[in-house]
Image: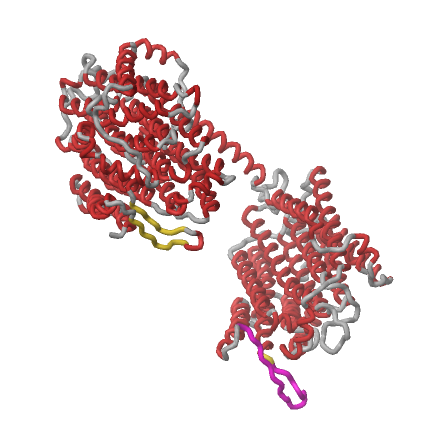
Amino acid sequence: MELLVAIIIGVLVASGIYLCLRARTFPVVMGLTLLSYGVNVFLFSTGGLKINEVAVVGKSADPTDPLPQALVLTAIVIGFAMTAFLVVLALRSQGEQHSDHVDGKQDDGGHQ
Amino acid sequence: MNLAFVVMLPFLGAFLPPLVEKVSANRTLLALGAGLLPATALALLYNPARQVFAGETLRTTLDWVPSLDLSLAFRLDGLALLFAILVLGIGLLIILYARYYLSAKEKAGRFYAYLLLFMGAMLGVVTSDNLLLLVVFWELTSLSSFLLIGFWSHQTGARKGARMAMTVTGMGGLALLAGVLLIGDVVGSFSLQTVLENGDLIRASQWYPLILCLVLLGVFTKSAQFPFHFWLPHAMAAPTPVSAYLHSATMVKAGVFLLARLYPALAGTDLWFELVSLAGMLTLLWGAFVALFQHDLKGLLAYSTISHLGLITLLFGLNSEMAAVAAVFHIINHATFKASLFMAAGIIDHETGTRDMRRINGLWKYMPYTAVLAMVASAAMAGVPLLNGFLSKEMFFAETLGSHQLGALSWILPVGATLGGVFSVAYSARFIHDVFFNGEPVNLPKYPPHEPPRYMKVPVEILVALCVAVGVFPAITVAGLLAVAATATLGGNLPDYHLSIWHGFNLPLLMSFVATAGGVLVYTQRRRLFAWWARLPEIDAKLVFEGRVQALGRAMAAITERFQNGSLQSYVAWLVTLVAVVMLTQLGRLPLPSLQQALDGDMLPMDGVAIFCTAMLVAGALLTTFLHRHRMTSIMSLSVVGLMVSLLSVRFSAPDLALTQLSVEVVTMLLLMLAMYFLPVRTRAESSSIRVVRDVAVALICGVGVGGLAFLVMTGDGASISPFFLENSKPGGGGTNVVNVILVDFRGFDTFGEITVLGIAAMGIYALIRDLHLASAKYDSLGRPWSRDAHPLILVTISRPLLPLALLIAVYIFLRGHNLPGGGFVAGLITSVALVLQYVASGVGWVHSRMPGDYHPVVALGVLLAGLTGVGSWVFGYPFLTSSFTYLYWPVVGKFEVATAMLFDTGVFLTVVGATLLILANLGKLSLLDDKKEGA
């Protein structure tokens, strides 16, 4: 099972980074979302994997590690805020420079 | 008398001239204002000076940065006193001289301010009792001399000369700092007293060669020693009072001052002899030789200064106590005759309008008085008997004869010294004969020249009088000062010597005779020599220097541009690659099991569902990536990924995460759809195939690396601090849901920070969206128009009854959060989703007519509430965010827990709702604007 989670993390990170390296804003936003999934799962996995051992007092004899969960929970919400910020930055860049290139390069030739 | 105060006086005085200039344009008043505080400082030194003459060393210390051993420590011993008198005394004469030199048009106030700044820095250098403080003042002299040399900033020569002086001396200052730091490391203190007392420790240290080289770099750059002498002639672009000050008594003397100051700590080794005397000898000869060929009056004096500094350096390098005495003596003598010569040159420049000795001839007829003064001073420079230069030169010759450190080659020193003397006499003769005799002036810009204003000559008169007085009556004029200064230099042991003008017929006198006769002979052959010199290829140090500096700048710019090319895309690539490299190279240092151990260890068994879900997730991620230009498909696959991640949380005992992920998923998808609406319909294929291959490689390396790291971490022993939270959750935080208790109680401060970030991000987004106008595409990439049915009836019908239900669930999730999966974050997200659904189904207008549409107060209220909950603990005398709880019995519901943490969680709830709606509602409104524009 650990191997599966490791594969998941690897795939999420690899595809996230590939998309982040693209030149247009939309794939970069997508890539960042994937990357934050990957990072969240990675952080979550550092506590070790346990099945049916919820970290609620009295519900489990050997509860899972609650600390990474608490960290990841806020990370998810902040990740959303950052994605939103990036989206709006992309829109602003589009509005100001009329280009969705991350470096603000103008499109040559035909229009959209 | 507090020494620190005396040192500060010139700095304070720097404020006066600009103030006086505002009140009055009277130049005399201005000069008086400038001279007031240095004169006070000089007067205040009278009593301390008597103590110093009585053999005391005055010291005063104010702590500055004690942890760095940096203190405002000043000392006044003989050496410091000598230099303080030179700096302040000649400084005052310069101020008087500048009163007449500067024209009425020039900004004299600023000039005096710079001069006083420099004077203060110089005074600080010579009186520092802490090496770090000395370096600070040292750099201050470099900075203020930059301002002085570049005072005529409209001239390109002044700007370049100033820049060169600052670059060279500033670099030397950095080397000096490094040397001083090493000294402090060896001795264990930066206190000058301690350093001087521990000379043996330094000389025995393995760092001694490095220390010596670094300190000498500072000295040689400052004192214009070969091969760093080239900046000094170019500093002649300064106004003449500045040259007279910087190149006689101060700036360049700072270098030889440091040689004298650190003499007990650094001198006495073979390395010292080799480095210092070699540099001194080369400088002495080269400066004297080149001085002869200068047609510019100040150029001649500049190279002569280089040569005399070489002489002083050579004396210090000889490792003999008597030579050090001679060096200190020559410092005094050179300061007096060279300052007067520069001033005389300035007078001639002032009265004739040129400094070219090929044009200035026969001035004897026009300004006999000035001529006498200048001739006496240059005779002192040449070392003519009955003048001060003669005395120290004789001592110098005697010392070169007495040095046997070169063994069989010891004759080189006296021969070199005599040769230097020959050229010194020759250029002095040229200064006298070319300028005041040698026929008639040629085509002077100002004709006929006449004597300068009366008081402009006073500083020259005083200095020339000193040259004569010291030359004739050394024992009653200078002997006392020289003795205390030399004692301080040597650290206590003064050799037996006698200052007198006649030592009988001896070898040094013969050398002087040879030098004088040879010098006159060389001068008579000058036309042939000049012709030979003129045929030599000309090397302008300024051009070479500027060229090198600019080449360096270009090289650095090229390197910078290679990385900082303005492309965010390549920055990200560099960043990721760098992180990957660090990760791969440092992985072995982490306390992780090896891959083999990890594979052999215990693992949870796989099952079909898990494999299926993993396959779904991987497929979703890959689809998102490969189809990123088909945006709708890409977003759909992304949502599959998000869903699978939530399921993963469910599977591995993290219901809180699953709830959060699921609700964030909904708002994220809405966000991406909105973004898609405004961004260009088609994502252009941008990347070259090389770039794709490179990016795939980087991505794969990172993916494999992070995945592998995660695998090793998961199978590691996993020692954790979490048992503490599990044990104390109920007794300490009053809740059984440990994740929530960590969020609102144990790590409440983190959470507080995080909701603040959330609030800031929301506000930033709000600010970015304001005044943003975007045109959305009317058709999708396949040419289909957007649906006309903006608010489908079915969606509207279903969404409205869902709202109260969703809100009820949110309240439930919120209340149970402390004990069961849920809490402020999840409840906030559920509420947001319920409200956003209304926006989507019924439109912004519909929602805003029923509830307020401003969400920033909600965000602020949330952060404020969470903060106030924390502050509340202070009222009861507990640390920030200490939580307290109790149990209440509610009718019907029964036993119910109330904790202050719930108040905090309410703050979290409000921030999440506010931020999410602020983001989505404002983005949504953009489309509304767009529609309106369309309608209008």
- The x and y percentages for residue A41 are 72, 60
Image quadrant in which you'd find residue B558: top right
Is residue B237 at all visible to an observer of this figure? yes
Image quadrant in which you'd find residue B30: top left
- The x and y percentages for residue B803 are 66, 74
- On the picture, is B80 further left or further right than B661? left
Q: Of residues B496 and B19, which is closer to you in this image?
A: B496
The mark total stands at 0
- On the picture, is B391 further left or further right than B709? left
- Please say if B257 is above or below B510: below
Residue shown at the point (38%, 41%) measured from the top left: B139
| Residue A14 sits inside the magenta stretch | no
Q: Quadrant of the C terminus of chain B?
A: bottom right
Image quadrant in which you'd find residue B538: top left
- The x and y percentages for residue A32 are 66, 53
Q: Which residues are magenta?
A: B880-898
| Residue B889 sits inside the magenta stretch | yes
Q: Of residues B452 and B820, which is closer to you in this image?
A: B452
